[in-house]
Image: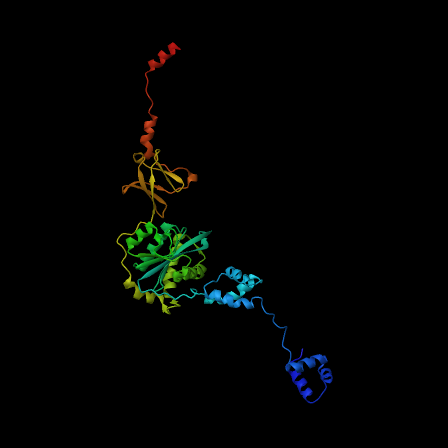
């Protein structure tokens, strides 16, 4: 291939009257190469000429569809196929991909909350070592929207009872309550999400909100960026706390280390967005938090059960005895995080049990059914003469 330097020599020789055949011999190329280069007026370009894409003439149609809010590649493909396009969808996707950053709604304006206004709540999970065993740890993260101070609590479940307990523990860690709590759409907090209007919250979550004086808020479905601050903290905890500490003696040891790490590391960090030490920023937020209630909300599992004819109630796959006088009565069952089953009737504590797997059998307190057994063990007493008289007739 001719270089620019070769063409410059070729041009100079041609202008001096040297025949093209002699120029070709001097440069070591074919005479036709010299002829074409002189006619072109420059050295040949690199590579082959680029073939026009099949998509080229349809790009204005695609641009129009994108402007109208149509970003689905399959829909766009069907539109341009009707106009004669016979190429693959991969060309369409390749053309759309770099334009997606311009898609309306992709850019989000950061929403900054006022001091004491909002706490964001979310769950994360990670596997780690507890007492020598590999365990899946669930942890609830609650972050103050203004100061970015956060608290997390580790447990083995993310059900309603643990969700409410985690929120309460965070309030106690902060020493106050925010005006709002923003949650994801898990069933323990939101029974029915809504893109427009008011979602339907779990009644017990509303009770918790009423007890602590905050307004519940829910993320719009499929728009978790609404609480992006808190979701980033889930990753922060995984990449910092659970990398620094890889094994724990017990659940209590895990949560003790968590609170120590929060005080020594997380609270002292300079937050990247506000460029301020979290603990110092929290000092301005703390006075605007609401006071904690005098009585802590009871987060234990709550359900109503009817006592069967045999004096048992069914709870989480097993049966538990209840004093016989409550047969056919409706009782309230509460299960604490310590796995204690408490049974109430009209606010009166009827009995207590330890939660137990059905594989270990029904849970029975003998005194509950003592009166029932005494009534069934009574045998009719008949005089001996009746049996003697019967034998005489036989």
Q: Is residue 42 above or below residue 319?
A: below
Q: Nearer the viewer, residue 49 or 68?
A: 68
Q: Return the x and y of residue 169 as percentages of the image width and height.
A: 34, 55
Q: Position of residue 356 (x, y in %)?
A: 40, 42
Single out the residue that lies furthest toward the front.
83
Residue 245, percent across and down?
44, 58
In the rendered view of the protein, which quadrant contains the N terminus?
A: bottom right
Residue 392 falls in image quadrant: top left
Q: Nearer the viewer, residue 79 or 235?
A: 79
Name the residue at 45% across, 52% down. Answer: 136
| Left or right of 317 in this view: 49 | right
Please name the residue shown 38% across and 63% down the image: 266
Q: Is residue 8 above or below residue 158?
A: below
Q: Residue at x 73, y 85 (%)?
A: 22
Placement of 40 over or under 80, stated as above or below: below
> In the orientation shown, which residue stands out farthest toward the top?
392
Q: Is residue 255 left or right of residue 86?
A: left
Q: How many marks?
A: 0
| Front-lying residue, 236 or 105 | 105
> Horizontally, is 156 left or right of 304 in the view?
right
């Amino acid at each position: 291939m001719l270089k620019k330097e070769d063409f410059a020599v070729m041009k100079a020789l041609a202008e001096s009257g040297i025949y093209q055949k002699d120029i070709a011999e001097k440069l070591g190329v074919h005479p036709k190469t010299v002829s074409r280069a002189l006619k072109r007026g420059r050295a040949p370009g690199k590579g082959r000429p680029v073939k026009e894409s099949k998509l080229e003439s349809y790009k204005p149609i695609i641009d129009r569809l994108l402007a109208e809010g149509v970003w689905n590649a399959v829909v766009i493909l069907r539109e341009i196929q009707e106009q004669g396009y016979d190429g693959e969808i991969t060309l369409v996707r390749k053309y759309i991909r770099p334009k997606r950053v311009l898609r309306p709604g992709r850019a989000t304006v950061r929403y900054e909350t006022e001091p004491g206004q909002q706490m964001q709540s979310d769950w994360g999970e990670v596997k780690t070592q507890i007492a020598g065993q590999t365990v899946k740890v669930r942890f609830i993260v609650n972050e103050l929207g203004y100061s970015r101070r956060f608290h997390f609590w580790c447990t083995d479940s993310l059900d309603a009872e643990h969700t409410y307990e985690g929120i309460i523990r965070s309030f106690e860690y902060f020493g106050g309550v925010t005006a709002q709590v923003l949650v994801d759409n898990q069933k323990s907090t939101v029974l029915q999400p809504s893109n427009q209007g008011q979602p339907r919250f779990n009644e017990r979550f509303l009770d918790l909100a009423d007890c602590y004086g905050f307004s519940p808020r829910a993320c719009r479905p499929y728009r978790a960026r609404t609480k992006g601050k808190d979701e980033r903290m889930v990753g922060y905890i995984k990449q910092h706390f659970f990398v620094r500490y890889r094994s724990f003696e017990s659940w209590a040891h895990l949560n003790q280390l968590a609170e120590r790490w929060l005080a020594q590391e997380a609270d002292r960090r300079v937050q990247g967005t506000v460029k301020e030490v979290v603990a110092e920023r929290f000092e301005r937020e703390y006075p605007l938090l609401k006071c904690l209630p005098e009585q802590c909300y009871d987060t234990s599992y709550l359900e109503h059960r009817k006592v069967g004819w045999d004096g048992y109630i069914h709870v989480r796959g097993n049966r538990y005895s209840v004093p016989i006088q409550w047969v056919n009565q409706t009782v309230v069952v509460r299960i604490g995080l310590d796995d204690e089953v408490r049974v109430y009737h009209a606010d009166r504590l009827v009995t207590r049990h330890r939660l137990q797997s059905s594989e270990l059998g029904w849970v029975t307190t003998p005194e509950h059914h003592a009166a029932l057994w005494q009534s069934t063990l009574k045998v009719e007493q008949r005089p001996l003469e009746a049996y003697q008289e019967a034998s005489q007739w036989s």
